Amino acid sequence: MSGRLVLLRHGESEWNREQRFTGWADVELTTLGQTQMRHAGRAMRDAGVEVDVAFTSVLRRCVHSLWVTLDEMQRFWIPQRLDWRLNERHYGGLGTPSSRCCP
């Protein structure tokens, strides 16, 4: 059985815009992030990509990215698996440093 694995990063979040690492902080997508996901969904739909199941972390920016993308692909009905083990890295005691300080 052959298949295709599609990896897609979440759209721009509020903290991405501020150049802050997000880690497990549960921040929303920006308007630009939602637009990015609509474009990604449209591009995959136009390319004939048919997703059968979707996996994402439980973080809001990731779940909303998935929903916007699947809606644009007209595949919102597929099984969606949310799992905390797909969350971004947890920065622990570092908190949420700015990406400007840590290249």
Image (cartoon, rainbow, N blue to C red):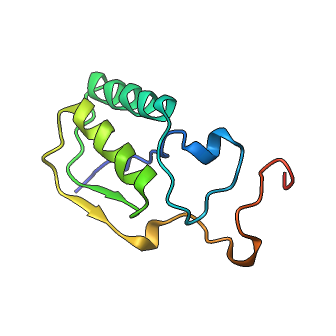
Viewed as shown, does residue 14 lie left or right of 53? right
| Residue 78 on image: x %, y % | 16, 50
> Is residue 84 positioned above or below 17 on the image?
below
**Residue visible at 83% across and 47% down in the picture:** 100
**Residue visible at 77% across and 53% down in the picture:** 98
In the picture as drawn, the residue positioned furthest to the left comes out as 77
Viewed as shown, does residue 25 lie left or right of 62? right
| Residue 63 on image: x %, y % | 36, 53
> Is residue 42 positioned above or below 20 on the image?
above
> Is residue 45 positioned above or below 51 on the image?
above
In the picture as drawn, the residue positioned furthest to the top comes out as 46
Viewed as shown, does residue 46 lie left or right of 86? left
Q: Count the marks: how many?
A: 0
| Residue 23 on image: x %, y % | 60, 63
**Residue visible at 69% across and 42% down in the picture:** 18
Name the quadrant containing residue 25: bottom right
Which quadrant of the figure contains the N terminus?
A: bottom left
Name the quadrant containing residue 40: top left
| Residue 22 on image: x %, y % | 62, 57
